Amino acid sequence: MTIRIVTKPPVGNMKTDRLKAVLRGNHTIEQKLCMSRQVLNLLLLEGFECAGQIDWWIPLIGRDGHEMTHFSNGKLISASQILIDNPYDCAADNYDMRGQGPPREVPQPY
């Protein structure tokens, strides 16, 4: 299993600041988890210590190799999404400045 960063071809290259990671082949969830971890480790080695929101598009397949369309409870997979809340609250997300007027100037030391 080789992992590398390659340049996108000029045709169909969307102008975005997001990095696309492609985990090729049909594998078990455990194997895909291992491949995902390798992507994250490569980014750490490249000097990236933080990341924004990550969107995964996971085509789910059955043991027979056919695409799955429903969960075991009958709910449509394409009508669902998995969300993980941020475990680290940001103070700026919870700070409400409405009704406080313009910001005051903070005296600067000389």
Image (spheres, rainbow, N blue to C red):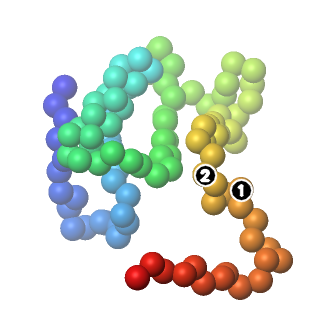
Nearer-the-camera pick, 70 or 105: 105
Asked if residue 46 is positioned above or below residue 61 in the image, the reply reads below
**109 left or right of 86 in image:** left
x and y percent of residue 50 in the render?
Answer: 38, 47
Tell me the kind of residue under disc 2.
Cys
The answer to whether residue 19 of the structure is visible from this angle is yes
The answer to whether residue 27 of the structure is visible from this angle is no
In the rendered image, the quadrant that contains the N terminus is top left
x and y percent of residue 54 in the render?
Answer: 47, 46
Q: Secondary structure at mark 1?
A: helix
Q: In this figure, which residue is indicated by the disc labeled 2?
A: 90
Q: In this figure, which residue is indicated by the disc labeled 1?
A: 94
Asked if residue 89 is positioned above or below residue 70 in the image, the reply reads below
Q: What residue is at 16 percent from the left and 31 percent from the top?
A: 2
x and y percent of residue 29 in the render?
Answer: 44, 21
In the rendered image, the quadrant that contains the C terminus is bottom left
Q: Quadrant of residue 13?
A: bottom left
Q: What residue is at 66 percent from the left and 57 percent from the top?
A: 93
**105 left or right of 53 in image:** right
- Give how far apart the Cα atoms at labels 1 and 2 are: 7 Å
Asked if residue 26 is positioned above or below residue 6 in the image, the reply reads above
Q: Secondary structure at mark 2?
A: loop
